Image (cartoon, grey):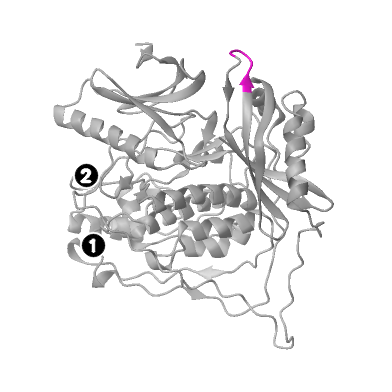
Amino acid sequence: MNKLGGRYVLLDQLGAGAMGVVWRARDEFLHRDVAVKQLLLNDVESNEFHEAVQRAMREGRIAARLQHPNAIAVYDVVVEDGKPCLVMEYLPSRNLSAILERGPMPAQEAARIGSLAAGALAAAHSAGIVHRDIKPGNVLIGRDGTVKITDFGISRALGDVAVTKTGMLAGTPAYLAPELARGAEPAPPSDVFSLGATIYAMTEGEPPFGKSTNDLGLLYKVARGETRPPTRSGPLTGLLTRLLANEPSQRPTAAQAAEELKAIASGVPVPVTRVIPPRPMTPPTGTAVLGAAGPGTMQGPPRTMPPQAPRTQPPAPLPATYDDDYGDYEPEPEPKKSNRGLAVAAAVLGVLLISGAAYAIISAYGDKSSTGAGPGSSPTTTSQTEQPTYDQPTTNAPKPTTEKQTPSQTKPSQPPSSKPPATKFTQAQVTTFTKQHYAKLPSNVEAARNDWDPGRAPGLASEKEHWGQFSKVAIRGTPLVQSDGEGDFTVTVVLELTEKETNEVTTPEYTLEISGKGDRLLITGEQRG
């Protein structure tokens, strides 16, 4: 079968998993590449076939409710031989897991990626959607630095019928929130924890619970909240501590996390706070090890170090701009790993045997696939229950204490600003800058790329590939300019793009992030419609 639904021509395979395959396809009606997730269910029992079909349809319905520039969009659902195929946005990309194989990345770049992913999560939560499997393998990085969350295959939406199996656990253990390992229902704070665990892996080189091939042992550590404190995350340390808080109510919301991460990515110096992890709690007895939280799961608050003079570190340099290599990260030395001893392992296994806890962990299709939209997850599930009503997490979570100066000083010294003094630009000047930028396209890509902040500019090759599709680029109407009052602007513009091959005109919406740098305006980000 080379064509689906009479319009989608399958071109090449992007990835495959236990129950499906993802193809790059060509939409013959709209003349664009798409990703098609096709279920392969020839050898499964009828009940499993029904469940897989229901999951695929649910993924399409959920994704259709979420429209955000940092989430992979679902365009269509095509049914062939009784099997639904999801037609999705195609993004030439690698997933974050594959990129991190080269080693940790600088804190500022991790903050940039994290802020965009957090924005998509915030939109999902506002729509009543919990992703449930945020991890590096489900974060795609495009050639131009675009960040998109993919795979809503095990996500849960309010009002959906549960399609989970008793005794099965949804999500990937290494990035799972502690309350889920203890039997709680998924909710927005659990996504926030998984986001924090993903950012932790970006800067620390491994998940906060460490690496292990023993899923049961790893689940036990997750349930106890045994995260390792970050040691190389610099300005992200304080925020990571709150994102990875054991108590869901102590974590920021996804929207709050997005704002803080954006500030860190901008290079504003942040005091590095040293945090000591909580004391190990007494292991719960009986079957409560991985069950619902009870009295045996109490734990104390984290202890902080005595006051010392604030220590700041300069912002880590951003990697080279994205091109075919998707970032030029130099691996950092692996941190020394502590020897926890055989006694702890024996105790973990002993408690697991006594409790009789047995969870089947089914993770998403391989983290290392270089797919456009990701092949999705195999059915990973929890017990069938009614859909939860989400309570908004409290926003008065305690923040890491800023360490004070020595007693002889009356005021703590303020860290110098890393931003050069900027000329105050008007919205009219930003409008003119935007029009001049797009007037250079598509004929002079190099000149248009010079309008970018050098540290944020996309790769020249990918820019030529993108704009080379068009014979004409024009602005429709007047750009909408919004200012934050501090020299940063968001510009929304509708473009008229004329395709070379067909002369068809499309009118996508583009959003530019523009900042005043010294005496000139520079582009710091772009979202393409």
At 28% from the left and 41% from the top, the residue drawn is 380
Q: Position of residue 487 (x, y in %)?
A: 73, 56
Look at the image and tell me whether residue 313 can be seen. Answer: yes
Q: Position of residue 367 (x, y in %)?
A: 44, 36
Does 93 sit left or right of 189 as displayed?
right
| Location of mark 1 (residue) | 292
Image vertical order of residue 242 relative to residue 92, above or below: below
> Along the line of sight, which residue is nearer the eye, 507 or 157?
507
At 59% from the left and 52% from the top, the residue drawn is 111
Dominant secondary structure, magenta:
loop
- Which residues, given as a range, are shown in magenta? 498-502
**For discs 2 and 1, the disc positioned in front in the rendered view:** 2
Quarter-of-image position of residue 82: top left
Quarter-of-image position of residue 63: top left
Quarter-of-image position of residue 93: top right
Query: Is residue 424 found inside the magenta-colored segment of the image?
Result: no
Q: Position of residue 220 (x, y in %)?
A: 31, 56
Tell which circle, 2 or 1, labels the residue nearer the N-terminal end.
2
| Location of mark 2 (residue) | 161
Number of labels in the image equals 2
Does 241 sit left or right of 364 as displayed?
right
> Which quadrant would the C terminus be assigned to in this image?
top right
Does 129 sit left or right of 304 as displayed?
left
